[in-house]
Image (tube, grey):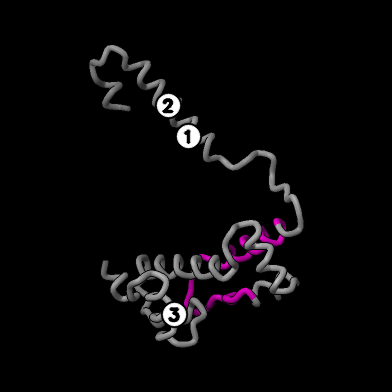
Amino acid sequence: MLAIHGGDYHYKAELTRNCIAVIIHEALRIQPPQNGSTQKNAATRIAHLFMDLLERQFPIDSTADPLRLRTAQDFAENLSVHINYLNRSVKEVTGKPTSAHIAERIAAEAKALLQHTDWSVADIAYSLGFEYPTYFNNYFKRVTGTTPKSFRKQ
């Protein structure tokens, strides 16, 4: 837009105005609804509580403070609901099982730790709650298709 503004195009003011209008409309389109977090039913409320609890565990800042909630059972106990109810609620609201959400978020955090820290793969494995680094290697390869070391080198 700066290049257009500084150029000699005859309709540069209209073009700049239209570009700004597109940006504003895109921002309005992707903006969350303004009517707050009104949940329609208990399943929606439980699913939102689960997603919030999942996200609050991240980012992992220290190898001394490992991930505490790793399974759907852990989340169900923390939310004081039966695991079947949690799984049914999350699947109904999001279309994906609870375990898929957990796996995706752990994989995303593993990728971030591999890219942005100098922690060893073993330290990352332990901080993500894996009992052994080999379990983490197998998990990471199954989810991403590559090993943690290969991912770090990319």
Query: Can you name the residue that lies furthest to the left here?
Result: 8
Locate residue 100, reporting x and y percent.
53, 68
Front residue of 113/21: it is 21
Upstream in sequence: badge 2 or badge 1:
2
Locate residue 84, reporting x and y percent.
70, 72
Which tag is nearer the camera, tag 1 or tag 3?
A: 1
State which region is magenta. 44-72
144 is within the stretch colored magenta: no
Residue at position x 24%, y 20% in the image: 7
Q: Distance between the residues labelled 2 and 1?
A: 10 Å
Q: What amino acid is found at the position of numbered circle 2 in the picture? A: Ile
Quarter of the picture containing the C terminus is: bottom left
Locate residue 109, reporting x and y percent.
46, 67
User: Looking at the image, is 64 positioned above or below residue 61?
Assistant: below
Front residue of 15/43: it is 43
Q: What amino acid is found at the position of numbered circle 3 in the picture? A: Ala
**Under tag 2, what secondary structure?**
helix
Which tag is nearer the camera, tag 2 or tag 1?
A: 1
34 relative to 102 in the view: left or right: right
71 is within the stretch colored magenta: yes
Q: Mark 1 points at which residue?
A: 26
Q: Which mark is residue 54?
A: none
Q: In which quarter of the image is residue 135?
A: bottom left
Residue at position x 55%, y 75% in the image: 67
Q: Mark 3 points at which residue?
A: 125
Residue at position x 25%, y 16% in the image: 9
Q: Residue 20 carries which label?
A: 2
Upstream in sequence: badge 3 or badge 2:
2
Residue at position x 60%, y 68% in the image: 98
User: Looking at the image, is 52 positioned above or below residue 40?
Assistant: below
